[in-house]
Amino acid sequence: MPSCSVTEISKCIVYPEKKSTVSDLRLSVSDLPMLSCHYIQKGVLLTRPPPSFSFDDLVSSLRRSLSSTLSLFPALAGRFTTSPAGHIYITCNDAGVEFVAASAKHVTVSDVLSPGKDVPLLVREFFVFERLVSYNGHHKPLAAVQVTELDDGVFVGCTVNHSVTDGTSFWHFFNTFADLTSGACKIKHLPDFSRHTVFDSPSVLRVPPGGPRVTFDADQPLRERIFHFSREAISKLKQRTNNKVNGIETAVNTEEILGKVSNDGKKCNGNGNGEINGKITTVLEGFLKSDTNKKNYDRTAEISSFQSLSAQLWRSVTRARNLDPSKTTTFRMAVNCRHRLEPKMDPYYFGNAIQSIPTLASAGDLLTKDLRWSADQLHKNVVSHDDATVRRGIASWESDPRLFPLGNPDGASITMGSSPRFPMYDNDFGWGKPLAVRSGGANKFDGKISAFPGREGNGSVDLEVVLAPETMAGVENDPEFMQYVSEVTYSC
């Protein structure tokens, strides 16, 4: 593995091609807590452009399209200002974003992908503003792009202030940037900069002298791996958490169905499972075909694929940490609130519209009860996070404005970020979709997980898992977890 040393070729400020007409945007209840977080760093690994398109040509093309993109996303070309009353605004003053062209020709695509191994630290050099805290947007650009030429590929890394965007807004910007680079004449969806939402608030966050700092040890020894889960593996997990037999939901009334099977003269004692499963399937088909039961069957009762996967990770990481059974563990999951509010927010609202859902359980309960129990704890919290819950969270913050405490101070927490629903592989800059998605060193600590869609789509998922070295070793040796993990074949 090469010890990377990315060479900077050029650096400049890219300005919007058209002047902004957007008024100052006050940071919201969802934006302000992120001032102590690092800038978001996500990027895509691509094959080399066609030979007729040199790296210099690519750099020029990216600069032009970035300028056009900033005209549609003027907030990213602005800076933070703080009013005398203490409110922080994005001033859309066209101050521009940083753009870096770099070279690492001794690094190959396979060096970056390193299947079955830890993500190499060299990936962090593909991004600008390493470990920059979002509050620094008062005097630093709110976004930056670095394009790095590799031996047989290209990496486009995007860095954006976390108080300006959440994952939804980040990928909207990144996708638009790629579309314009590839020659798209019309953009499908424009960002919505309105601030007339429940997240807009007159409350003031008092920032400590010198500005906030991250709430975790950024120098803690860590390992980082990408674990890939195929559609088939996730389907098996979902079947486990929903008690499915031959693909049919049995959780709707398991006891009633087993009773019917037993009354029919079959012993449900673990022997003759094939015959029993067949009988359950027959009974279930009749149960679900009933008009009454169709009406009464609530789809929100089903534990989702992602909740099933998250539950398995929660169990396996907890087991690897060797916690006392009485120790309380926390699985924290970020949720998009745009569609949870009544009335719903514009899906392309530009800014943060997220809240964090913590689910708590003792280590003993997680490991002695089955996977369905763990998944159901997550499921109940996500399903219940409705309009009223979102508004209660806003009211709670307004009564006590505070920064978001990232990290794992008790050694028993997991924080899930990003989403396999984000259109990461839609970033086609003109010569094919990405080979992989990778992130920089931002906001990484023991227990930080980021979910990406698998490159093949169809419900596959990649988890970027960051753990203490001894915990990672335990997860890698956990057969319950590793049975669902598969290697990825990267093809151009």
Image (cartoon, helix red, strand yellow):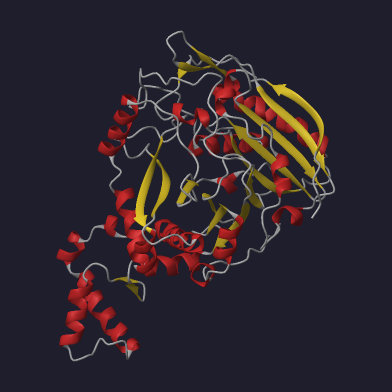
Which residue is at a point 47% across and 17% down the rendered structure image? Answer: 88
Q: Position of residue 308 (x, y in %)?
A: 41, 61
Q: For the view shown, which residue lies furthest in the top direction?
A: 84
- In this picture, residue 289 sits left or right of residue 362: left
Nearer to us in this view, 189 or 38: 38
The relative height of residue 377 versus residue 28 in the rendered view (above or below) is below
The answer to whether residue 420 of the structure is visible from this angle is yes
Nearer to us in this view, 43 or 65: 43
Q: Position of residue 431 (x, y in %)?
A: 71, 46
- Say how many tags the image has: 0
Which residue is at a point 39% across and 18% down the rendered structure image? Answer: 204
The relative height of residue 203 versus residue 247 in the rendered view (above or below) is above
Q: Position of residue 430 (x, y in %)?
A: 69, 43
Nearer to us in this view, 43 or 411: 411
Quarter of the picture containing the C terminus is: bottom right
Residue 397 image-quadrant placement: top left
Quarter of the picture containing the N terminus is: bottom right
The answer to whether residue 53 of the structure is visible from this angle is no
The relative height of residue 58 versus residue 16 in the rendered view (above or below) is below
- In this picture, residue 294 sits left or right of residue 122: left
Which residue is at a point 58% across and 65% down the rendered structure image? Answer: 476
- In this picture, residue 138 sits left or right of residue 313: right
Q: Position of residue 328 (x, y in %)?
A: 37, 53
Nearer to us in this view, 69 or 417: 417
- In this picture, residue 482 sits left or right of residue 488: left
